[in-house]
Image (cartoon, rainbow, N blue to C red):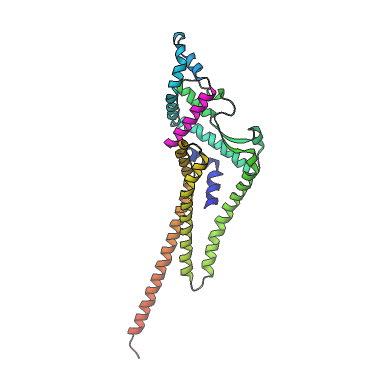
Amino acid sequence: MLAVWADRQLLAPGRWANTSTELLRNQKVRSATAEYLTDQLYDNVDVARLIGSGLPAPLQGLAGPTTGALRHATKQGIELALAQNPVQSLWSAANRAADEELVAITNGGGNDLAVNQGKVTLNLRAILNAVGARLGLGADLGNQLPASAAELTIMRSDQLKAVQRAGRTLRRLALVLSILVPLLYLLAIAIARGRRRRVLLAVGASAMVAGIVVLAARAIAIPALADSLAKEASVRPAARTVISIATSMLRQLAEAVIAGGALVVIVAWLAGRSRGGHARGGAAKLRTMPAR
């Protein structure tokens, strides 16, 4: 389940782009992203000058005080923009590009990594441009930022080898285990002559236990990972939401395995009752037959 989830979710740019859109539709994630973009804007752009350039000459002295007062309004404006379909499309495209680069590296590429200063990043500059246009601060607002601003680092060059090994291992495991595990279950049932019902019950129960273990591990890992990744307490709710949405496919896989295991157990149990009923009925008929 873990291997299939990682292969289909993390190493599939199209699927991850769809998941990223679901992330931005969450209010906690939008709020955290808007806060980050607001910080990048105020830390790297002379917002007072931009505001002052749009004011009449007698009122330009108000640009400084207005800038501080408008910080909260700017965050709200960015958050509102992030909820709009055009900006979410930019977000999806940025996530797809980042995941495509990650997949290229895991498949043995990595030439583009040097071009990006040794990092795989999620570039939000296009989003900030769109937001700037909506806020009246200019459609090239993101382009005024330094190269390192409005970028979230996903992977550094010193992690390249580890990511390549992990990616290759996950792809192989996803393929091999998806075939091997069902075959081993079928083999166990095939060779269990005289006790196939008991083995079938064990197969169903083991699948249910595996699914429950995955669900429990996910529930424990979400807050633990969020606390380790997000150093600031204010960001942790958004981090938990991100991890929860990103692992939703893993939850669905586990639930499907549990349901399949339960179905196998029910079928095996009903088959045993049916055979038992026939056996008891046959014995009763033998007892009631007249002796000749």
> Is 162 on the left or on the right of 252, as rendered?
right
Q: Is residue 201 above or below residue 117?
A: below
> Is 263 on the left or on the right of 42, as rendered?
left
Q: Is residue 291 above or below residue 150?
A: below
Q: Residue sitting at 45 percent across and 41 percent down? A: 241
- Residue 237 in the image, given as x and y percentages of width and height: 44, 39
| Residue 179 belongs to magenta span | no
Magenta-drawn stretch, dominant element (helix, strand or loop): helix
- Residue 154 in the image, given as x and y percentages of width and height: 57, 38
Pick the residue in front: 282 or 220.
220
Q: Is residue 134 above or below residue 107?
A: above
Q: Is residue 53 above or below residue 152?
A: above
How many labels were placed on the picture? 0
Residue 115 position by quadrant = top right
Image quadrant occupied by the C terminus: bottom left
Q: Is residue 25 visible?
A: no
- Residue 186 in the image, given as x and y percentages of width and height: 52, 64
Q: Is residue 9 visible?
A: yes
Q: Residue sitting at 51 percent across and 44 percent down? A: 225
| Residue 34 belongs to magenta span | yes
Q: Residue sitting at 63 percent across and 45 percent down? A: 162
Pick the residue in front: 66 or 269.
66
Q: Residue furthest top?
A: 58
> Is 209 on the left or on the right of 171, as rendered?
left
Q: Which residues are magenta?
A: 25-45
- Residue 255 in the image, given as x and y percentages of width and height: 44, 53
